[in-house]
Each structure stands twice: as C-alpha cells, then as structure tokens.
Amino acid sequence: MKIVALDLGDRWVGIAISDPLGIIARPHDTVATKQLHQFLENLFSKEQIQTIVVGYPKTLRDTESAQTKRVRTQFDELKKLFPDLTWVLWDERLTSKEAVRMARHLPTKDKLLVHARAAAIILTTYLASLAIQGD
C-alpha cells in the first residue's frame, strides 16, 4: 500500500506519493486547492493508498498560526470525505523553504513543482520516522 503526502496551501496543494513498500517518496503533482477533492477521488480510485500524511504548519515556537488553523479545517474536511483511510497530521516546519531552495535552478514554468517537492519532503520525514520506529 502506498502513502500520500499533501502540502495544503490556500491556492495550491503539493502531492507526493510513496512506492508500495513505503520506502521512497517522490513528488507527484501540484493541483489547485479548489480541485483537490476531485483529484484525490481520482488518485484513490487508481492507486492503493493506505495513509494520507498532511503537512501541519506549526510556527517555529510550536504554536498555531492562522495557516495552521486553515490546514486543520481542511484536514478535518478531508477525513470526513475519505473516512476509510488513515489520516496523519505531520510537522512540516521549514519544508516549503527547503523545497524553494532546492528549486532555485528550475525554469519559471516548473515553479509549481515546488509544492509537490515540499510534499515529498514531508513524506520523506514521515517515512524515515516509520523506519526508525520499525513499522
């Protein structure tokens, strides 16, 4: 079963997906936030997904911001839409900055891939935690 990570934003959502063994994370796509539900329905019908990891943007002081609250609301809505999947909130502090840093060399037309790369970084840290735990 595969694991998907979402980097939820106000305008765009980055999506990453693991290999079936849950070892490797790769950027998958970036979609408009308005189209996320339809995109996920499509993805879930084609892929065997077990877990959805959603980046949780806490502040560096470990508090909640307005964006954190928006993500929490979206997370709760998605859990209701797809209740048969396991949903996980995962600390995403600094992942977007890291994805932007890694994408500085990309042509302008590929800048949307930054969101999917941020999701892949989120997924990579989640998969690493599972490996450490021995799951």
Image (cartoon, helix red, strand yellow):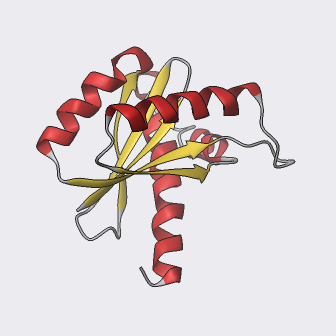
Above or below 106: residue 34: above
Q: Is residue 46 above or below residue 1?
A: above
The number of numbered discs placed on residues in the rendered structure image is 0
Q: In this view, does 126 lie to the left or right of 113?
A: right
Location of the C terminus by quadrant is bottom left
- Name the residue: 52% across, 43% down: 118
Indicate the position of residue 4 as horizontal and vertical percent values. 35, 49
Name which residue lies at 21% across and 38% down. 43
Q: Can residue 107 be seen in this view?
A: no
Q: In which quarter of the image is residue 101?
A: top right
Name the outermost residue toward the bottom.
134
The answer to which of 4 and 81 lies nearer the viewer is: 81
Q: Is residue 130 visible?
A: yes
**Relative to residue 49, is residue 101 depicted above or below?**
above
x, y percentage for residue 53?
A: 46, 50
The residue furthest right is 61
Residue ID at (57%, 52%): 90
Which residue lies at the image location 27% right of the left edge and 58% below the top edge? 2
Q: Which quadrant is home to the N terminus?
A: bottom left
- Most extreme residue toward the left is 46
List x then y, in percent, for residue 92.
Answer: 63, 48
From the viewer's perspective, tell me whether residue 21 is left or right of residue 109. left
Residue 66 lies, in percent from the top left, at 74, 25
